[in-house]
Image (spheres, grey):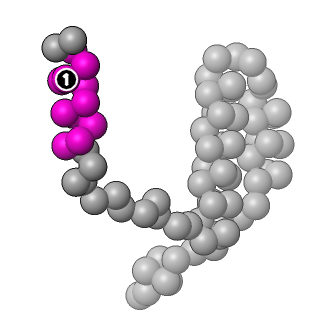
């Protein structure tokens, strides 16, 4: 019985916590994350010997180029 009382009080305490909305990403940000994850997988496959260096180069060449940020262009 005591266990239920502790569990219920913990649930009641959490009711007062503000729930923040999930962050939203633009489509460009989502694609950048996906591309970065793919590249990381490809490099890991190469490191483990699952793919060859030529295959790695081909996979990396197939990935969309990422646009440079404005800070990169500043002189």
Nearer the observer, 2 or 18: 2
Nearer the observer, 53 or 60: 60
Q: Is residue 31 left or right of residue 19?
A: right
Count of numbered labels shown in the rendering: 1
Density class for disc 1 (Cα within 10 Å; few <14, some 14-19, many ≥20) is few
Q: Is residue 2 left or right of residue 22?
A: left
- Kindly identify the residue that appears in the image at 21 percent across and 12 percent down: 1
Q: Is residue 43 left or right of residue 22?
A: right
Q: Kindly indicate the quadrant of the structure image that contains residue 28.
A: bottom right
Q: Over which residues does the magenta segment extend?
A: 3-13
Which residue in the protein does label 1 denote? Answer: 5
Rendered position, 43 above or below 13:
above
- Kindly identify the residue that appears in the image at 61 percent across and 49 percent down: 36
Instruction: Look at the image and tell me in which quarter the C terminus lies.
Output: bottom left
Q: Main secondary structure of the magenta part?
A: helix
As drawn, which residue projects farthest toward the front? 1
As drawn, which residue projects farthest toward the bottom? 75
The secondary element bearing badge 1 is classed as: helix
Nearer the observer, 5 or 38: 5
Q: Percent position (x, y) of residue 31?
A: 68, 60
- Kindly identify the residue that appears in the image at 68 percent across and 26 percent down: 46
Please check the rendered image and state whether residue 62 is part of the magenta-colored stretch, yes or no.
no
Rendered position, 23 above or below 63:
below
Q: Percent position (x, y) of residue 63?
A: 76, 54
Q: Percent position (x, y) of residue 52?
A: 78, 25
Rendered position, 17 above or below 65:
above
As drawn, which residue projects farthest toward the top? 1
Q: Percent position (x, y) of residue 9?
A: 19, 33
């Amino acid at each position: 019985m005591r266990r239920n009382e502790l569990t219920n009080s913990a649930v009641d305490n959490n009711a007062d916590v503000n729930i923040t909305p999930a962050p939203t990403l633009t489509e460009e940000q989502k694609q950048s994350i996906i591309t970065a994850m793919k590249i990381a997988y490809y490099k890991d496959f190469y490191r483990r010997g699952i793919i060859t260096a030529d295959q790695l180069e081909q996979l990396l060449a197939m990935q969309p180029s990422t646009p440079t940020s404005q800070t990169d262009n500043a002189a």
